[in-house]
Amino acid sequence: MRVKRRYVLVALAVTAASAAAQRYRMRGDASVEPNPSYDGRYAFVRLRYGGEDFRCWSNEGPGWHHDYPVADRNLMKIMSELTTLDARLDSSMVLDEDDPALMKYPIAYLSEPGCWQQTDAQVKALRAYLLKGGFLIVDDFSIRRHWYNFVEQMQRVLPEGRLVQLDVSNPAFQSFFGVQSLEMSGYRGRAEFYGIYEDNDSTKRLMVVANANNDIGDYWQWSAEGFLPIPLTNEAYKIGVNYLMYGFTH
């Protein structure tokens, strides 16, 4: 994958969200567009989970649905501008953890893990995905309110896994952009980043990365609206691009 020979200012590279995406922004339910057929191109994958925990519901629907599909599309727009990745810009994937289609995509995104619930079959499927080489990005949660459920569900998937705090030198933050600091102003306090390594060995690949006290998907979603500060939106895009590049290359 080669970088195009031109610089694109991250926050300004995103155009206004498409009309199709905007239809879903304020519906307050879990409406999703049809998943595209697999054609070899990379599509943003968002994991869906069930349960009746309404603590994570908002006018955007349940927690897993937050920022969909605008954040997904905008990040793919950035990837298409900055790299030669053949990314789908017209649609993204919403998959249950035990959907066999998940194995076709190396990276998956999970929002609001404070309300994350899994069946035994989904636990087994997500474990197989991660051990086979999948990379999971967990976003949009606070340590104070959501940490314990996140840890509980993660331990069901990887009972042997240990969550460790990551610093800015980690390859996940340096795989494309050279991120200088993780001192982001989180929505729920100081942003912290955690990960689980394969075999709990920091010389091996990260299988999971978690953005605690943060919501980088929100920055992606609202980047065309001027709702959030451009410097923080830039950093959120840099982190998102780095995550994808890390997932593709490790």
Image (spheres, rainbow, N blue to C red):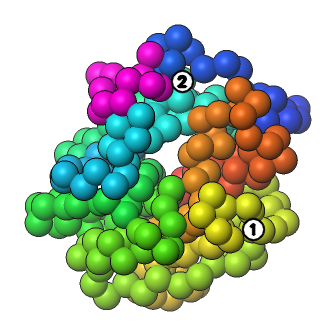
Residue at the limit of the structure toward the top, as seen here: 19
Q: Residues within 10 Å of mark 1 (few under 14, many from 20)?
A: some
Q: Position of residue 84 (x, y in %)?
A: 67, 34
Q: Quadrant of the C terminus?
A: bottom right
- Judge whether residue 101 can be spotted in this image: yes
**At 41% from the left edge and 56% from the top edge, which residue is drawn?**
112
Residue at the limit of the structure toward the left, as seen here: 120
**At 31% from the left edge and 59% from the top edge, which residue is drawn?**
115
**Residue contact at pointers 1 and 2, CB within 8 angstroms:** no
Q: Give me the disc on residue 182.
A: 1
Of the residues tagged 1 and 2, which is closer to the observer?
1
Q: Give me the disc on residue 172.
A: none
Residue on which disc 2 sits? 89
Magenta region, residue range: 23-38
Q: Is residue 17 left or right of residue 198?
A: right
Q: Is residue 224 left or right of residue 156?
A: right
Q: Position of residue 163 (x, y in %)?
A: 47, 83
Magenta span includes 32: yes
Q: Position of residue 16 (x, y in %)?
A: 67, 19
Please name whichever residue, 101 or 225, is drawn nearer the observer in this view of the structure.
225
Judge whether 241 appears above or below 184 on screen: above
Please name whichever residue, 12 or 26, is drawn nearer the observer in this view of the structure.
26
Judge whether 127 appears above or below 25 on screen: below
Judge whether 108 appears above or below 152 on screen: above
Earlier in the chain: of badge 1 and badge 2, it is 2
**At 27% from the left edge and 84% from the top edge, which residue is drawn?**
159
Q: Position of residue 234 (x, y in %)?
A: 78, 45
**At 74% from the left edge and 40% from the top edge, which residue is drawn?**
228
Task: Tell me the SS state at disc 1.
Answer: loop
Magenta span includes 148: no
The kind of residue on which mark 1 rests is Leu
* Figure quadrant of residue 129: bottom left
